[in-house]
Amino acid sequence: MQDAALVRTRKRRSNKAVFAGLSLMAVALLVSAWELVADLVTTFAAVAGLLILMYGVHLAWLVFYEREPDGPSS
């Protein structure tokens, strides 16, 4: 069974990563719409945001996946 402090830490880190990834993708979209920088820069920023978002989802998945089993296997 996971320690409650470890679960809270993983959830907090997951939430931060998901929020940061979504924010980076939103900023890249706005900058691209306003045509402030080259398209390649905003594409890289959006891809980086997606990778950060995927990392946050991975952390959240580990919180639920590594739980104590509900009972014996059938």
Image (spheres, grey):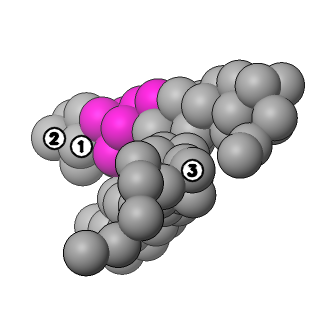
Q: Which residue is mark 1?
A: 29
Q: Is residue 56 visible?
A: no
Q: Nearer the viewer, residue 62 or 38?
A: 62
Mark 1 surroundings: few (<14), some (14-19) or many (≥20) residues within 10 A: some
Q: Amino acid at mark 1?
A: Leu
Q: Residue at x 57, y 39 (%)?
A: 14
Q: Amino acid at mark 3?
A: Glu
Q: Name above or below for residue 25 compared with residue 51.
A: above
Q: Position of residue 4 (x, y in %)?
A: 76, 25
Magenta stretch encompasses residue 22: yes
Q: Which residue is mark 2?
A: 33
Q: Secondary structure at mark 3?
A: loop
Does label 3 or label 2 sit earlier along the sequence? 2
Q: Residue at x 74, y 43 (%)?
A: 2
Q: Name above or below for residue 34 compared with residue 32.
A: above
Foreground tag (3 vs 2): 3
Q: Secondary structure at mark 2?
A: helix
Part of the protein shown in magenta: 19-28
The circle on residue 7 is none
Q: Residue at x 46, y 39 (%)?
A: 18
Q: Left or right? Give the position of 63 relative to 72.
A: right
Q: Which residue is mark 3?
A: 68
Secondary structure mainly formed by the magenta segment: helix
- The image quadrant of residue 42 is bottom left
Q: Name above or below for residue 5 compared with residue 37.
A: above
